[in-house]
Amino acid sequence: MHPHVRARRLTRIVACALVAAQMPILAQAADAPPFGILLAQALAESPAFLEQQADVGAALADAAQAKAWPNPRLDTLVENLGAPQSGGQSQRQSTYSLTQPLEILGQRAARVQVSERQLGVAEARRYQAKVDFAADLAIAHATVEAMLARKALAQDDLKRAQEDLRAARAQVQAGREADIRQAQASASVAASQAAAIAADADTSQALNRLSMLAGASTPYTGVSERLLAVVRPAVNPVQGESLAVATARAEREALEAQVTVEQKKWLPDINVSAGVRRYAWSSQSGYVLGVSASIPLFDQNVNGVAAARQRIAAAEARLAAAVLQADATRRSAQAQVGAAEQRLLAATEGEQAASEAYRLGRIGYESGKTSLMELLAIRRALSESKGLTIDAQLARVRALSALAQADGKPAFGDEK
């Protein structure tokens, strides 16, 4: 062989080896990261959460702006323009003054308090958006796991159906079974193939939804963590406050602060001014001082205060409703978690029994003690029991996510 040809062949072999070595790494890179990392990355890209984050930033800026003092006003007044001269001297006078508005009796403090309370409302809504998003992402993650498990189950069921077909064909050729048994086994294989195709489509749909929620530029090919197998509680055993209750309480406190602002509006607007007056007929100047105040004679903002109090009453009603709803939601979530745990336990036991039944059925069919119809029925029962276990695991994740929302904590994530 020519040396150049040998060198080129060696180069291709090395290149193929490098690509083959990198394929597992690329496959792992396409999988979704562990849920905690995935949640942090998704929150940085989620439009809904970014909207709440921007609202918090706006409320923070409003709170800082509320602490600013009112700006002073500079006035210039020129008098006696065009007036007749006195003794040959101009009667013109020029006054330059600086006026500073004053906030009295807690007007500024009330305004600052409202902005701070509104910041609390924005932060409560932002955290609620985080918890809701974490629950949605956890369910989407668990759905991917369930669909991948169903896909593997469908592939295993197809393999078992093909094994049953081979066994049925052997039995028919040996004269132990009628030809119809082979046709029935073939039909079972076709049904398993259709189920495998449907499972593959469901898996692709679940992966696309998870990728969309996480803001991934390319769809994931799998997950690197199994939420379906989590055995520890997803939330702190100590009950937290419902986010709906926290948000309703923050809104009520903001409206309470607004009442104080409305009450302060009847106070007069005080302005203090100081300046200098120059006389055209001499080089001398005089000083001016002044105080002005509005008179709250016709408008004492009585109806504004009444409206603010009515808004507090409405907020109190919403808070009471939120407390009742939160208690009911948490009790329901706890019951759902308990039921899901019992359902998963029963499904696991049923799957173990079905697996043993199929093993014995195969032995019986190969020895001629079990009919093909019985074997097919046992195999369907095994597939159904495995599917019930997957459904029970997914239902458990849904229940734990709902309980985390009720407790006001991110599901399967950090609690900070």
Image (cartoon, rainbow, N blue to C red):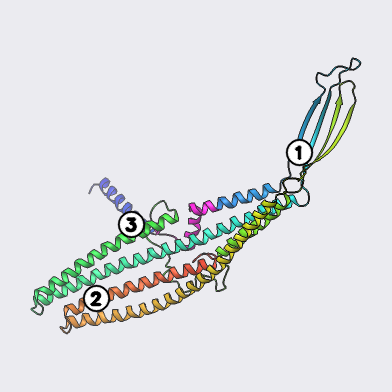
| CA distance separating discs 3 and 2 | 38 Å
Q: Nearer the viewer, mark 1 or mark 3?
A: 1
Residue indicated by mark 2: 379
Disc 2/disc 1 C-alpha distance (Å): 87 Å
For the residues carrying marks 2 and 1, which lies nearer the camera in this image?
A: 1
Report the residue marked by disc 3: 20
- The span shown in magenta is 28-52
**Identity, as a three-letter code, of the amino acid under mark 3:** Ala
Is residue 169 visible from the viewing direction of this image?
no
Q: Secondary structure at mark 3?
A: helix
Q: Amino acid at mark 2?
A: Arg
Residue 325: horizontal and vertical position, in percent?
53, 68
SS assignment for the magenta stretch, majority: helix
Furthest-right residue in this view: 87
Residue 72 disc label:
1
From the top left corner, tell me how far across and down residue 261 is, in percent: 70, 52
Image height of 379 relative to 264, above or below: below
Residue 311 horizontal side relative to residue 103, left or right: left
Relative to 202, residue 335 above or below = below
